[in-house]
Structures are given as C-alpha cells and as structure tokens.
Amino acid sequence: MGNKDVFVYLEQHDGKLLDVGLEMLGPARQMAGRYGGSACAVLIGGEAPEESINRALRCGADAVYVISGEEYATYSVDAYTHALTELSLRHSPAALCIGATESGRGLAPRVAARLGTGLTADVTDIVFSEEYGCIGWKMPAYGGQMIATIICPEKMPQMATVRPGVFSIGEDPQAPVSPEGRVFREEIRFPRQGIRTELIERISKEVSASGLREAEIVVAGGYGCRDAEGFALVTKLAETLGAAVGASRAAIDAGWAAPELQIGQSGVTVQPKLYIACGISGAIQHSAGMDKSGTIIAINTDPDAAIFDIADYGVTEDLRTFLPALISELESLRG
C-alpha cells in the first residue's frame, strides 16, 4: 500500500462512529480505484471496538488502520495531530479525508501543515481530474456564487475536510465481514505531557440539526414566507407530513427559525427522499445543501426562480394560499 491509497479518518464520540466518516468511504473507494489503490479507514482512540472496525469494512473500507493508547482515550488535537501525521508519513497515502466537524476543522489544518501539503476545506463533492490525474475537490466559492474544483497534483497527500451529509452511507448490514488481513494496528504513541488540554467535563446537548440530516422528508421555508406567520405554515406542513423543518439563511436572519435549522453552504447538508422548498429562490448558497435530495418540490411565485432548475415538480403559487389547501387535503386523506 502507499501512494495510491485514500485514507479516511473516522471520528468517534464515546466509542460511536460519526456518520460523516462512513459517508466518505464510498467516494474514497471510487477515487482509490482510479489510482489503483485502496480505501483505508483510520481509527484513533483508547481502544478500537470490533464493531467499529467491522462497520468500517461494511461501509466500503478495504483496510482499517487502528491507532490506540490511553493518550487517545479522550480527543485532543495535540495527540490526534501527531497520530495522523505519523501514519501519513509511514504510508504516504495519495489523499487524506477528514470530516468537516468542529474537531475535524481544527485537526485537518494542523496535519496538513506538518505534512507540508495543501488543504481544501468544506468539500461538497469529490471527482477525479482526468487532466491532472488526481482528485478534484468541489466546494462553494465566492460567497457561494460558484462551485470551484480544487486540485493539488504536486503535493501528497491531497487533503480535504468534507461536509457531513453530502454523501450517503453505503452499508450492507448483512454483508459478511472478514477483518483478517485487512486490519493493521499501528504503534504510534504520544507523551501525555505533550497534551496541552484537559477535559474537565462533557455536557451533552441534543442538536436538532442531527435529526434534520437524517430525516426522510424535509420541508424548508425561505424569505418568500414573508413573515413568521408565513413560516408557521411551513412548520404546519412539516408536522402534517411527519417531516423535519429546515430554513434558508434569509429566513434564519429574519428570525423566523432557529440557526441550527439552516440548510445550505453555511448550514446543514441534507439528502432526504423528499424535499419541499417553500418560498426559497434557489441561490447556490442554499441549493448546495439540498440538491442531492431524492425528489424536490418547489413552491414559489416567481416562475424564473433558480429553485425550479433543480426541482422535479414546481408550483408557481403563493404559499400562503397553497399550503393551507395542501395541508387541508393531506389531513382529509388521513381521515
């Protein structure tokens, strides 16, 4: 292995793998295939539960690198930076992907700096550049006005932080798993005195954005709702459908919805089976966070709104009259 492999760091919280790492394994395997290499998951922690290893393999990892030790039991940017850097120096992967989470955004630039390579942040898609023979990282640029493809053909590994929710987890729970010959335990230690932070207390809080990412149906409202009363109709429709509520940045800024409900470039990325956009113009800042939804229904009074370019079905009506009628019809069908 080495030089042709794509490494994916799998972030864990309390021994549970975050979805973003598992989401990256599918595209990592595709890109590694173009290099003629392997998709390799990287697990760091006090220990590596067998279930985490097996799940990584079921989600597309060809191999799993495990770095364990008491110094890794609690996340610290010092120890984890050292571990990822040393692993990369040992095996020289072609690329290293890290989730664009709160800790991932702090970890990735430190690893990139030590490796002397570039870093593309907040990636929303991964492609292969035939012209340069390397990965192309797609990300919103110029305030979301365009999608740029970033390449780094002269420095290895190519590095990126990838937004949660932009890819789906490709897992077959029934697939047989054979870890033999595919799990590599690396001896990489870090002195405890080198850890400059100490965890005093962990306070857990339920964040509604998590449910938004996992929802099968999302109803989102934008500035076209006109006021809080209009946005309340969006919420009512979501309740009727058993859906999650989302919002555009304009609706957030207007104070009609909580910030954690924002969908788009600077918010949450979702891929529900059904996405209903109410009063949303469809600017790229928003569409970057929902354009991979299964079916998109757009409701907007402007027939030229950009949202109709990506919608499967469009309704050019005032949502203040259309939504009450739709809600009434749905309620009557439910009896």
Image (spheres, grey):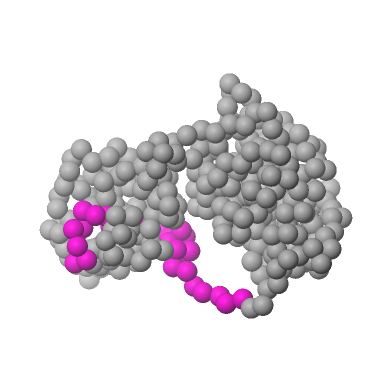
Left or right of 258 on screen, residue 85: right
User: Toward which corner of the image does residue 2 lie, by quadrant?
Assistant: top right
Quadrant of the snapshot with the N terminus: top right
Residue 212 magenta-highlighted: yes
Q: Quadrant of the C terminus?
A: bottom left
| Residue at figure coordinates x 53%, y 43% from the top left | 123
User: What x and y, as percent, mark residue 155?
Assistant: 69, 32
* Residue 220 vs residue 161, the one in the foreground: 161
Q: Quadrant of residue 160?
A: top right
Q: Is residue 308 magenta?
A: no
Q: Residue furthest right?
A: 187
Q: Residue at x 27, y 40 (%)?
A: 306
Over which residues does the magenta segment extend? 202-229
Closest to the observer, 41 or 57: 41
Please, is residue 140 above or below residue 252 in the view? above
| Count of picture labels | 0
- What is the x, y in percent for residue 170? 58, 49
Residue at the spot 52% in from the left edge and 50% down from the top edge = 163
For image coordinates 19% across by 67% down, the residue present is: 229
Q: Is residue 144 left or right of residue 257?
A: right
**Nearer the observer, 237 or 151:** 151
- Residue 105 pos. (x, y %): 59, 53
Q: Is residue 200 left or right of residue 283?
A: right
Q: In the visual, does 305 lie left or right of 99?
A: left
